[in-house]
Amino acid sequence: MSPWWQSAVIYQVYVRSFADTDGDGVGDLGGVRSRLPYLRELGVDGVWLTPFYRSPMRDGGYDITDHRDVDPMFGTLADFDALLADAHALGLRLIVDLVPNHTSDTHPWFSSPHRRRRYIFRPGRGDGPPNDWESVFGGPAWSKDPHSDDWYLHLFDASQPDLDWDDPAVRQEYAAVLRFWLDRGVDGVRIDVAHGLVKAPGLPDAGHAGQDHRGGILPYFDQDDVHEVYRDWRKILDSYPGDRIGIAEAWAPTADRLANYTRPDELHQAFNFPFLLSPWQAGAVRAVIDQTLRTNPAPTWVLSNHDVQRHVTRLGSLERARGATLLMLALPGSAYLYQGEELGLPEVLDLPDDTRQDPTWRRSQGRDPGRDGCRVPLPWTGEPPAFGFSASAATWLPMPPDWWQLSVQAQQTPDSTLTMYRRALHIRRRMTGPLHWQDAPDGVLAFTRSALTCTTNVTDHGVDVVPPGTLLLASTALDTARSTGAVSLPPGATAWWH
C-alpha cells in the first residue's frame, strides 16, 4: 500500500482568517478545532496550519520569536494539543509550518552576544550595502545594523534577518524545533523558503538575474549545499512512526533542480509552482503536467495559496477556476487546497489602503498590492457582522459585504462550488493508476486514469466532444442536445467520465 501522502488532499488553513472563537476579529486555534468536522465532511485527508507561533506579526506570523510556543493571539499549547487530538480522532493528519530561513528581529538571538554568528552580517561596499541583492518584498536585501557599521541580510522584510546556516548552533536549534513538534504528534512539516537557507560563498552580486529564480541559480537561492540540511531532517522524520513527512516550499530554475528536494533521502514533497503559474493554454498546461510527472514520482498540485492571487481571479472567471480544479484533482499525486477556494472566493482587490498589512505593500510604497487580498477571513454564514467568522465586526481584514452569498451556509445547494468540491473529493478517492493522454479536439486536454476519463476545454469557446463514458461530474452544465451524440464542453469546463 502506498504511503498516505502520495495521494492525499491537504487543506491549507491560514489561521488568522479561518475562524475566530474569542471575538477579537482574528482567527485562532480554537476556531480551527471547531471547524474540523467541516473539513472532514469536505473530504480532505489532512490540514496544514500556517504559523501560529509567537510573533510580532510584521509578516503574518512568518517573523517568529519563539518556534516552540503559541502566540496568545491564537491560543496556547494546550489549545494546539486539543486541536491535534481532535484532528486525529477524525482521521485527519496535521502539518505545521517551519520557518528556518529567518527569524523576527525581536527573536532573543538577534540581540544576543552570538548575533553576528547566527545571522549574516557584512561590511558595506563604499556607502552602500555589501552587494546588489534585492528583497523578495522589494528594495535592497540589506539594512544597516544600528549597533555597528555593518549591514545585515534580510531576503524578506527588514524585520526578518536571515539566519547563517554555517553556524552549527543554527542547525542544532532547528533540528530540535523539528523534534519538538514531531514529539507532540504532528504528521509533517511544511518548510518555508526551503531553497533559501544556504547562500553562495563570498555572497557575490546577483547581477542581471536580480530576483528572478527562473532565470538561473541565484547566489541566495537553491544552492547545492542546502540539501545537506534536508538529508539530516529526513533522518529525523524517518525516526518517528507513522510516515511523518517534510514538504518543501522551494523555487528552482528547472524542474530537475526542483526534483532534487524530493530525492529518496531528502524531503517527501515539493510544491509544484510551475503548475500554479502555467498560463491557461492547452499546450502549456500539458507541458507542465508532463514535466512534473517525468521528474517527480510523487507529484503535488496546487492552484492557490496564501502568497498568490486566488485562482478565480487569476484565471479570469469562476468557470475557469472550477474547470481547473477538476483537472487538478484528476491528476495522479497529492493536491493542496487553500481555504476558501471550495467556496469560489475571488481575490479582494479593493481593500482600503489603511487596512493592508502585507510588508510587500509597505516596502513598495503601495505600488504592489501585496497578498492581503487572498487572506480575507472566510464567510461561514449569512449572519452579520462577520458572516460567522467572528462575533466582532472589526475583523483583522475587512470582509466584502456581499460575501454572505459565498458563505458555507449559502452553498448547501446542488450546483454550488462547495458541492462540486465535496463530490469531486469523494470520487477522487476511487481514482487509481497512471495518466494516459487521449486524442482530443484542439484546445481540449483529455486523459484517462484507470476507469476515469477527464476532459478539459482550455479554450474560450464551446467544443464538441464524444462522451467517453457515463458522466460522473462536470464543472458546469453540459449541452447534450447534439444529433451527432457529441456533447458541447463549455469554455473552461472540465468533465469526469466513467
Image (cartoon, grey):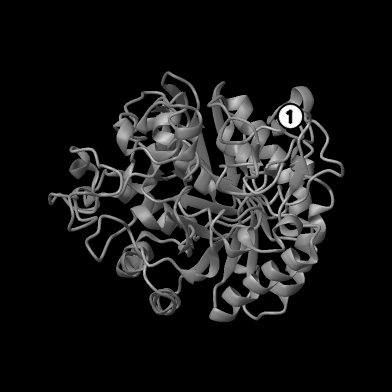
Residue 429 position in % (x across, y down): 49, 60
Residue 27 position in % (x across, y down): 32, 58
Classify 361 as above or below 343. above
Name which residue lies at 44% across and 52% down. 57
- Give whichever of 211, 353 is nearer the camera: 353
Evaluate whether residue 390 shows in this view: yes
> SS of the residue at dot 1?
loop
- Please identify the quarter of the rendering in which residue 346 is found: top left
Residue 305 position in % (x across, y down): 48, 45
Name which residue lies at 49% across and 35% down. 360
Name which residue lies at 66% across and 32% down. 134
- Give whichever of 322, 243 is nearer the camera: 243
Q: Which residue is mark 1?
A: 132
Q: Amino acid at mark 1?
A: Asp
Q: Is residue 13 left or right of residue 5?
A: left
Residue with the most extreme top position: 461
Residue with the most extreme right position: 201
Q: Is residue 36 left or right of residue 125?
A: left
- Please identify the quarter of the rendering in which residue 56 is found: bottom left
Name which residue lies at 34% across and 41% down. 344
Q: Is residue 85 left or right of residue 259?
A: left
